[in-house]
Image: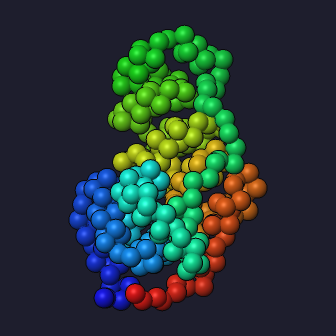
Amino acid sequence: MKDLAGFVEKVLSDLAGLPEDAMRLGLLGRRLKALDPRHAALLIDAICRKGRGGRSSRMALMALVDPEGLKSALGEEKCALIYLASIELGLQRVSRLFTDLPPRKKGLAGYDSEEDAGMEFITPGERRAMARGFKKDSLLRLLSDPDPAVIGNLLNNPRITEKDVVRMASRRPASPGILRLIAGHRIWSKRYGVIRALVLNPYTPPRISIALLEVLPAQDLGPAAEDGSLHPQVRLAASEILKDRNGGDRGQTF
């Protein structure tokens, strides 16, 4: 079998040739399923360690953000075996990706102001239609809507800007479900400001924050490691990734 570095480059090259995250996750899942659990864990660890090293590695990392998608691509049994192998090998970056922890803080989405709260008297169907519209004032009032379908329509609306999505991703309190929608969006999940806002939001599910940490620059890992409002595992992961980048990558082979 090829050395790990060569195998990783081949996988990344194949993933980069696909246009959508779902397709990349499907291919990555097939590659991982073909490996024994130990080698699968080493492959995921190597992808994580490449971090922000290039477009292909970032694309591969973003395919790992969705925990349910990863579970679906691999199957529960394979996920469990890779998790156990990562524990045995001491690959904490990998084991955290297979651990679904509750958010550090829990809360429900809701309207930010008394004026915007009046939107609750409009039916969900009407609000969902408004979220597909072109009136910017109405769209802005819907940014804190508690209905995931409304938020989904907003995220796909061409009138919505990155600044608007960062505002949604930064809200506290916030619904974990809505934050998952943002983290899994085909466009907004790739934007630096959105990623940073999700990672630094204590209402974001830790599993998502931990995956997104891998694509953040060192300047943001430090604040994440020291932010007492974040889940301890998120802070620990940020600290370890920062230390790893400063110390260089480990070389491993299959």
Q: Is residue 159 or residue 81 the one in the foreground?
A: 81
Looking at the rendered image, the quarter that the N terminus falls into is bottom left
* Residue nearest the viewer, comparing 144 with 78: 78
Report the residue that reaches farthest toward the front.
77
Q: Is residue 45 above or below residue 113?
A: below
194 with respect to 224 (left or right) = left
Given residues 65 and 215, the one toward you in this image is 65
Q: Please give the name of the residue rendered at 64% of the width and 60% of the height, measured from the top-left corner.
A: 234
Lateral position of residue 219 relative to residue 34, left or right = right
- Colour pattern: rainbow
Q: Quadrant of residue 74?
A: bottom left
Q: Is residue 235 visible?
A: yes
Residue 244 x %, y %: 59, 79
Question: Is residue 94 depicted above or below 108 in this figure?
Answer: below
Q: Position of residue 10 (x, y in %)?
A: 28, 78
Tell me what residue is drawn at x 47 percent, y 68 percent.
Answer: 81
**Quadrant of residue 237 in the image?**
bottom right
Residue 213 can be seen in this image = no
Coordinates of residue 92 in the picture (x, y in percent): 59, 72
Say which residue appears at 44% left-offset and 50% top-offset: 68
Most extreme residue toward the right is: 228
Q: Residue at 24% across / 60% down in the picture?
A: 18
The tally of labels here is 0
- Quadrant position of the C terminus in the picture: bottom left
Left or right placement of residue 78 versus residue 145 in this view: left
The furthest residue to the top: 121
> Residue 208's spot in the image, x, y percent?
53, 54
Indicate the quadrant where residue 127 lies.
top left
